[in-house]
Amino acid sequence: MIKKLFIIVVSCFITLGLSSTALHQEKKEGIDTLEFLLGEWESQSINHESGETAEGRSTITWILKGNWMKWEFSGQTSAGPVQVLTLITYQPDRQKYAFYSFNNFDSDPLPHFGNWIEKKTLRLTIIEGDQNTQIDFILRENGGFDQTHSSVSSTGEVKVRLTTRYRKIDKR
């Protein structure tokens, strides 16, 4: 009986020790390359299919000891207000960036994964059934970034549907 109790107590201490270590880890490898996203942003989008434009604001911050980023977006379109919450991390085991987006018009999160394809271009892919969407984040020389949403056909044809320009809000 005492032996069993001792094993249980030791197991608890080992488990607590491992949990404590995991809680005090530094940022995940790879996530730092997304620091350009941090801050407050104004954005202007154009829908290339309808010609419609929209404006929005974003706040992007570190959360969970720098292992994740939280991107909060709010904007207005002709269909009404849009709110999006995106959680972002780097998955070293998959060697990919993972973005999980939640919004006010879908009940399921939208996962998208990707990597840097050029020095200043991060490409994410969303696969929903037979639809394939690619999202490119393109860093601008003067600061800020552009984002393009494109549909990709089964033959590989890429058609840009939405372009968004992000400008950092100066808080001086």
Image: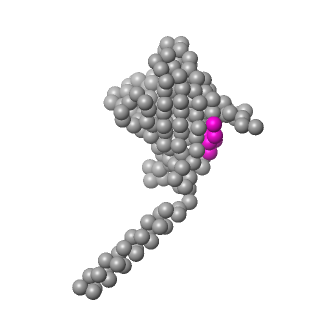
Region rendered in magenta: 35-40
- Name above or below for residue 18 compared with residue 156: below
Task: Looking at the picture, tell me which residue is in the foreground, 76 or 125.
Answer: 76
12 on left or right of 55: left
133 on left or right of 47: left
Say whether residue 22 is magenta: no
Q: Residue at x 47, y 67 (%)?
A: 20
- Name above or below for residue 21 compared with residue 85: below
Task: Looking at the picture, tell me which residue is in the foreground, 67 or 34.
Answer: 67
Q: Is residue 145 visible?
A: no
Q: Residue at x 49, y 39 (%)?
A: 86
Q: Residue furthest top?
A: 51
The part of the image, by quadrant, that contains residue 12 is: bottom left
What x and y, as percent, mark residue 58?
58, 34
What x and y, as percent, mark residue 15?
39, 70
Say whether residue 37 is magenta: yes
What x and y, as percent, mark residue 79?
46, 18
Q: Is residue 72 visible?
A: yes
Task: Looking at the picture, tell me which residue is in the foreground, 160 or 20.
Answer: 20
Name the quarter where the C terminus is drawn: top right
The part of the image, by quadrant, that contains residue 125 is: top left
Name the quarter where the N terminus is drawn: bottom left
